Structures are given as structure tokens and as C-alpha cells.
Amino acid sequence: MSIAPQLKDEQLPSGAEAMREARSASQIGPFDYCPKVGFREYWYPGIQAKRVGREPIHQVMLGDDLVFFRDKDGKVVALSDWCPHRGARLSRGNCEFKGTIACPYHGYVFDGTGQCVAGLVESPDSPFVPKLRAQKYPTAEHEGLVYVWMGKTEPVPLEQDLPMEFLDPTLTHYRYLEVRVWEANWVEPVAQGIDFHAAYLHRNVNFWRFFNRDLTFFRPRMISQGGCKIVADGEDYVNVDYANVRYGQDYYPGFDAKWPRHVWWRILRRKKGPGMTGKPFVNYKYNAQLPSIIRVTRGSSIHMRWMVPLNEDETRVWTFTIIKKPKTRLRQLYEDVWYWGWRRPDEVINTNVYEDLVVFKKGRLNLDRPQKLGPLDAGLIYFRRHLARRSRDFKRLGGAEGCLKAPPGTYPVEDGRTDHQRK
Ligand code: FES
Ligand SMILES: [Fe+2]
């Protein structure tokens, strides 16, 4: 993703189109072009290398059961967890011989490439052994995080799919990381990164917000945003911002009263307007990027989440808090206290888990019903309609497995041009 300058409507054909669609209500569904268990032709974060020791580790990614272990060079590798012999779980076996994994059922042993190298109880010189091969998933490690290529086609270089922040040496990469499984389909945690629910869902004061100069209690409260506007877009991302923010209190003719109703304890106006503490080092506020990354800027930090679908109802959510790398040890200590003592419990846990997830977890949000998207959803319409169809699944496979309107083969395999360029 590159950060594009702010563009005008007419320079943004598909973005402007999404905004027009939003004003007149769009009915594009969450799974029209987005697959229920995620786009496949991408690298996704799989596991922290330090978790893979002498024992094999099972992990589900995009509906596939994987087993992680170390090959003869000590590199973390991933195979399908289902043994090619009779389908037992390799992860229930062991890594008794360096660089291999032995299936617990009949003792066929596989190396890091997936090739069977021995049939322990069959015979030492079995002619069957060379014919047995487990499915391998390409893996690549970056600073201790193991990424897995989930696609059917040739993997692209890992750098192409790494968030640009991880390639910038001035930023903290994986230092502030939280990994949790959320009981929700992946599309909703992506949608909420660009859907402008914050002024309502996160409107209330709580313990952590008493310590937060930037949120509800200490600032004029943002009550409406006039919808959202697309401020930049590109091949694989969209940046959105508030269209027209109003603060304090407003009159709503629909119920002939003001809202919020009680404002006596609030600051209603501030001359310079509210502002986050800390100077942002990027020029976007809300961002979504293929295949399933969102970013929200908070002052001089980026709240980045990368969703890895497990199945239709569960998602492993990797939350990275990115800041400028501190230059002194004292500053480092300060940042660690800031993250562990406040940022993580406040935003990553309290806001995301106890406010966001509670609303959209399984059973609380119905993704099967028709949806009518409006001005709050311009970014979301853009993601669902335009970004999804620019995904590598569409480019390489002509569609995406598990979406409603475009299974593989539905679209012409692309020539490398974007929707923009083709118009
Ligand atoms: S099922 Fe794995 S060795 Fe037989
Ligand atoms: Fe939220």
C-alpha cells in the first residue's frame, strides 16, 4: 500500500462511485464478492516462530488444518494436518527425528517438504514411501513471525503482502502485539475499521476513558459525521475520513428533541476543535487493505488489525500497535508502560473486545439478511464492490471460492490492470 495524496471526487472514479452508491442506498452484501472464509491468494500471519519448539503445533487458517514444525535447518514449516496415508492428524504425532514429523497412527514420517521419508512399521526400504507426500504450505519468516501462503498459485514475494509499516525501520513492528480468536466472521472486524460506528458505540465513559484526553469525557463529543468520504484509494486499499463532523449537541426533528440529552457535564465546544494527542505520521485516518487489514490512526500511533479467518464463524485477530521506535531507553520504558498499562487494556481489550466484538459476535449480527448500506458505509461499499474484485483471487483465479456472485472462473483472469485503468 502506498499513501496517496488526498484526491478530489472526479479523480476517484470508483471511490466517487461508491459514495454515490452510498447516498442512494446500496444493497451489496458482505459475501457477494468477499469469500466467507477469506481471500486465498495472499500471505497471512500464521504463528510466532518462538511458539514452535520440539512439538508439532496445530493451527487452523482459512478453513484448513495446518501443522507447524521445524525442518532440518530449523526453519518453521507448515503441512496439511491430515496425513496423506489414511487421514490422521499429524499434529498428534511427534518430531522424534530432527526435521521430521511422524504420524501417530502408522508411523509414516514426513520431512519439511512434505515428502515421506520412512515407514517405521512397514519396512526400512519400502517402495511405497517415495510415493507418499503431504500437502505443504509455503512459509516465510519475518522478524520472528511466520507467514503462510494460502493460495493455490505461485506465492508472490512476502514483502509484497507485508504491511508497509513492517518494512519501515523507524517503526515498532511486532513489539506491541495481541493475538486473539474472535467468535465472528472476518468481514465484520474489517468492516468496522471503516464503518464509522465509533461516535455511537464507543460514546460512553468508562474507567479507561477517564485517563484518555482524546476520548469522550475530556473532549467535545463528536455526535455525527455526515457519513464518511473516501479520501484516497489504490490498487489494494481505501482511505476514508469523516465527511462533516458535528460536536456537542444537535436537534433531531425526527423525535423533536436534542441529542445527547444530558450534556451539563461535558465540554461542548473548544476553539481549536478537538485533537488527538501526538502528531500522526501518516496522512489517513481510517484505512482498509486487501486481503483483510484495517488501520485506525490514534494520535501518533496506528492501530492495525489483520484478520485471519479460521472458519465462517471464527477469526484470529492480530492487533499490532505501531509507533515510532523510541530513541532512548527511557523513552522505550515509557512506551512499554503506556502500551501495557493503558493502550492495551483501554483500546485493544476494552474497546475492541468488550464494545465492538460484543455487537458483532456470532448470534448478535445477522450477515445472512439483506443489508441496506448508506452514507456511513461508503468505504465499506468500496471494499465489498471494488477492492474485492481487484483481489488476487479475482486476478489469478477469475473469482473467489466461497463468495456468492463470483466463484472462480466467473471473471476473466486479469491482465494486471485495475478497474480504474480499464475504464
Ligand atoms: S494415517 Fe498417518 S500413518 Fe497412517
Ligand atoms: Fe469500534
Image (cartoon, rainbow, N blue to C red):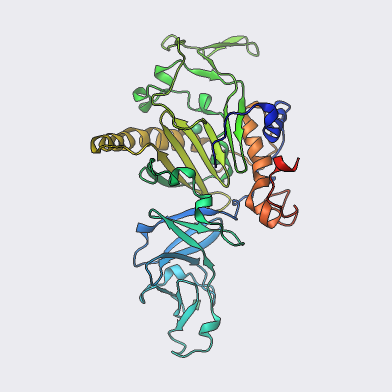
Q: Is residue 264 left or right of residue 260?
A: left
Q: Relative to 105, does residue 230 appear above or below in the rendering?
A: above
- Residue 249 visible? The answer is yes
Q: Position of residue 23 (x, y in %)?
A: 70, 26
Q: Position of residue 6 (x, y in %)?
A: 58, 28
**Quarter of the figure that contains the C terminus:** top right
**Quarter of the figure that contains the N terminus:** top right
Q: Position of residue 253 (x, y in %)?
A: 64, 11
Q: In terms of depth relative to the viewer, which is nearer, 207 or 269? A: 269
- Residue 402 visible? The answer is no
Q: In terms of depth relative to the viewer, which is nearer, 204 or 240? A: 240
Residue 100 figure quarter: bottom left
Q: Give the residue at x 53% y 50%.
A: 161
Q: Relative to 147, does residue 325 appear above or below in the rendering?
A: above
Q: What residue occupies the far left of the structure in this picture? A: 330
Image label count? 0
Q: Give the residue at x 39% y 24%.
A: 277
Q: Is residue 364 left or right of residue 395?
A: left
Q: Give the residue at x 68% y 46%.
A: 389
Q: Relative to 235, does residue 99 appear above or below in the rendering?
A: below
Q: Is residue 238 left or right of residue 26?
A: left
Q: In terms of depth relative to the viewer, which is nearer, 312 or 364? A: 312
Q: Give the residue at x 70% y 35%.
A: 14
Q: Is residue 204 left or right of residue 4?
A: left
Q: Relative to 118, does residue 352 appear above or below in the rendering?
A: above
Residue 401 figure quarter: bottom right
Q: Position of residue 214 (x, y in %)?
A: 41, 23
